[in-house]
Image: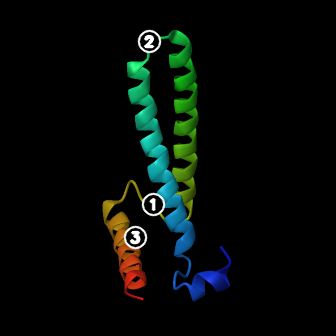
Amino acid sequence: MNQLLQNMMGMGGMTDQVIATDFLISAKAGVRNYAAAITECTTPELKAALREQMNAAIVSHERITNYMIARGFYHPHDLSEQLGVDLTVSGTALDLAQK
């Protein structure tokens, strides 16, 4: 998003992080949903198609995770660091809600 628009909306540089986090959560839910669907399938062809889609969702999840780690948005191996990021994001969301 354009930096001027972000600043006007009071979001600063948080937009990329918010979008990436939402995308990561969606990718994770997709993997879970594909796994559940595969266990309910009765035809080998459908199972194979769903496995292919699930594998693509897993690859997407990994790419999003790597993007977020590289930009400091996500710290899966450092809970205290991630807590700091989460508190900052939460504070920003609360500030935006009050405006």
> At 56% from the left edge and 30% from the top edge, which residue is drawn?
53
Return the x and y of residue 45 as percentages of the image width and height.
56, 13
Residue that numbered label 2 is attached to: 42
Disc number placed over residue 74 in the picture, else none: 1
Look at the numbered disc 2 and give the secondary structure of its residue: loop
Colour scheme in use: rainbow
Residue contact at pointers 1 and 3, CB within 8 angstroms: yes
Q: Earlier in the sequence, mark 3 or mark 2?
A: 2
In this figure, what is the number of numbered marks?
Answer: 3
Disc number placed over residue 21 in the picture, else none: none
Please indicate whether residue 63 sits to the left or right of residue 2 in the image. left
Q: Which quarter shows the C terminus? A: bottom left
Q: Is residue 72 visible?
A: no
Residue that numbered label 3 is attached to: 85
Identified by mark 2, the residue type is: Thr
Q: Classify residue 29 by image quadrant.
A: top left
